Image (tube, coloured by chain):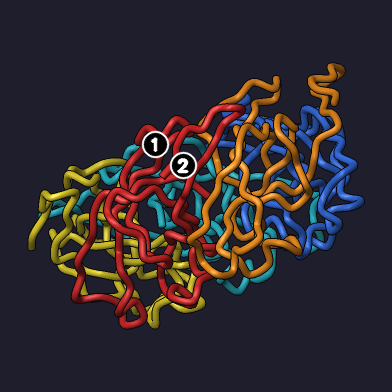
Chain colours: A yellow, B cyan, C blue, D red, E orange
Amino acid sequence: MQLARVVGTVVATRKEASIQGLKLLVVRPLDEEGRETGNAIVSADAVGAGPDEVVLIAAGSSARQTEVTDKRPVDSVVMAIVDSWSVGESTKYKK
Amino acid sequence: MQLARVVGTVVATRKEASIQGLKLLVVRPLDEEGRETGNAIVSADAVGAGPDEVVLIAAGSSARQTEVTDKRPVDSVVMAIVDSWSVGESTKYKK
Amino acid sequence: MQLARVVGTVVATRKEASIQGLKLLVVRPLDEEGRETGNAIVSADAVGAGPDEVVLIAAGSSARQTEVTDKRPVDSVVMAIVDSWSVGESTKYKK
Amino acid sequence: MQLARVVGTVVATRKEASIQGLKLLVVRPLDEEGRETGNAIVSADAVGAGPDEVVLIAAGSSARQTEVTDKRPVDSVVMAIVDSWSVGESTKYKK
Amino acid sequence: MQLARVVGTVVATRKEASIQGLKLLVVRPLDEEGRETGNAIVSADAVGAGPDEVVLIAAGSSARQTEVTDKRPVDSVVMAIVDSWSVGESTKYKK
């Protein structure tokens, strides 16, 4: 999984039938220091994440292993909201 | 998923039997500002996307979770046409 | 999928039993202008592609969705021979 | 698989129901000399790995092939603790 | 698939139960000229490859399509030993 921040949303009315009702978020991956890194990804929301929240995203077929994404053409899912993470003795992020 | 723009089409008459009838699009991934980024990808069209449209593409096994791509050797699918996306308070794209 | 050119072949007599009989091609991915880009990939041939032909390759589990690659340890397949592709109004390649 | 070092942990109380109880580790991939390389990854722990341990991680659908990750939205798993590895005649790491 | 050279081995006694008995090799991907390229990968051996041998590796779920890796948390497998490969008229490698 990757640490990421929710930075935006995508609206798409004309889409594959099976993804009706999915909330699509724009997320930016974070490195272990909490800095944004790499390109934005569009990720389906499985946990009710809000703007600016730090989350975990899972990719590939694993992104379909949630109730809302099951059997849908979705290759990235927000599957957790992060409370905190630490590296060594140092807390890098706390909600 | 990735934001992308439809930039072209591919014609292939000699192909694996199971992909007969699929429309193959050349798409360019977009970053969150709407700039083209990275190499072109050939993606199967599941939503009737036209030239220059901004779309969402899904990759890997998730690309097979649409009616037209089911069980086919297809690793990228256009599964939505984007109406708009925003980052923070700013609308980055509106159709 | 990716545009690619067939540039060579691989011979391997000692191999996992299930891939006996598969033809293994060395292919080079192409960008939308038809220039070779990135590293060579070894891809199983599902369509009878010949030397120098421009083809489409599919990766990952999708590479196993052809008759010759089904249930085999193969992560790339040549699944179409390209007749032509265009970007905007411009034909970039014609066989 | 990739060699990696366990460098931290992630706490997430609000998450997809199916990942309750999973321990989430921050890991850094290692090159063959044991140097950290590339970005941190969040990986589910299937073997009881502790801080600073050198481990093997598996990605993608293969990350779901353990008892604790089966059918869960998890795309990286720590599936072994490394005792040693060698390159040519040289032992690069020994626990 | 990728061309690769076997450069080492990994020993791991504490591991997910399902991978007991698998031989784990350190391999380096090769470009089409036979030069090592990119980072080392740890790959399960399905064909009895020895040190310095040139092999083919398959990644992702395809790495589980061999008898020894079936249903195991393994994302890379050595599935063939290469006898030779050629690019155009030129033989780049012969065992």
Quarter of the image for residue D94 reads top left
Q: Amino acid at mark 2?
A: Arg
The quadrant of the rendering that contains the C terminus of chain E is top right
Taking depth in this image into account, of A37 and E76 the one nearest to the observer is E76
Q: Give the residue at x 67% y 32%.
A: E5
Q: Is residue D76 visible?
A: no
Image vertical order of residue D21 relative to residue E17, above or below? below
Q: Give the residue at x 46% y 67%.
A: A62
Q: Which residue is mark 2?
A: B28
Rendered location of residue D9, percent (x, y): 23, 59
The tag on residue B4 is none
* Mark 2 vs 1: CB contact within 8 A: yes
Q: Give the residue at x 60% y 27%.
A: D89
Q: Residues within 10 Å of mark 1 (few under 14, many from 20)?
A: few
The quadrant of the rendering that contains the N terminus of chain E is top right
Q: Residues within 10 Å of mark 2 (few under 14, many from 20)?
A: many
The tag on residue B37 is 1
Q: Amino acid at mark 1?
A: Thr
Q: Is residue C42 visible?
A: yes
